[in-house]
Image (cartoon, rainbow, N blue to C red):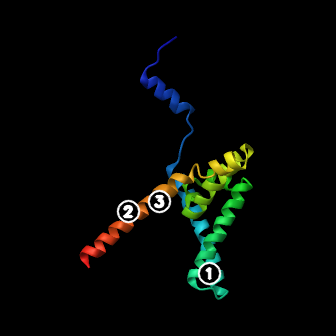
Amino acid sequence: MKKITTAQYKEMLDNITPGSSFLLKSLRAFLIGGAICMIAQFICNYLIGLNLSQNDASTFTSIIMILISAVLTGLNVYGKIAKFAGAGTLVPITGFANAVVSPAMEFKTEGYILGLGAKMFIIAGPVIVYGVLTSVICGFLLLIFRTVIG
């Protein structure tokens, strides 16, 4: 077997690896992420126009965006959007809903308990755990800061 040098290996790798345009990917992420946020803002404004308070409209907007993301994930549309937009689909609430529904769809064949129930939070679980842990730490720091300062 013929040995190849590091330079030859890098050249071979560069020849078979598809090119990546950082600017194009950034533009796609910006446009799709912005479109998701624009849709959410439109829904919120519409609900406010129906005489809901800002707080209630925001809550219902979150629920609607989660529902839309979950349905699109179930229909295998969200994954196609994510493939095109990259990080633009990681807008927190829709990306989180996708992270919960996607494994649920993948493991549903293993049953409701050991498949869907056990693996639904395989991606989102660490986010929840460390998010809650960080919130508790920040809460304690705030409590200490307010107690000491005044």
The quarter of the picture where residue 16 lies is top right
Disc 3 and disc 2: Cα gap in Å? 10 Å
- Number of numbered markers: 3
Nearer to the camera, 99 or 24: 99
Q: Secondary structure at mark 3?
A: helix
Q: Name the residue beneath numbered marker 1.
A: 45
Tell me: residue 116, above or below residue 146: above
Whether residue 24 is visible: no
Q: Is residue 103 left or right of residue 127?
A: right
Query: Which residue is situated farthest in the front direction here?
Result: 113
Tell me: residue 95, above or below residue 54: above
Nearer to the camera, 56 or 85: 56
Q: Amino acid at mark 3?
A: Gly
Label 3 vs 2, first from the N-terminus: 3
For the residue carrying disc 2, how many other residues have a C-alpha within 10 Å: few (<14), some (14-19), or many (20+)?
few
Label 1 vs 2, first from the N-terminus: 1
Disc 1 and disc 2: Cα gap in Å? 35 Å
Q: Name the residue beneath numbered marker 3.
A: 131
Query: Which residue is situated farthest in the bottom direction here?
Result: 51
| Disc marking residue 137 | 2
Kindly identify the residue that appears in the image at 43 percent across and 64 percent down.
135
Kindly identify the residue that appears in the image at 52 percent across and 57 percent down.
128
Label 3 vs 1, first from the N-terminus: 1
Residue 9 position within the rendered picture, expressed as x and y whole percent measured from the top left: 48, 25
Q: Amino acid at mark 1?
A: Asn
Nearer to the camera, 11 or 37: 37
Q: Secondary structure at mark 1?
A: helix
Q: Is residue 40 left or right of residue 108?
A: left
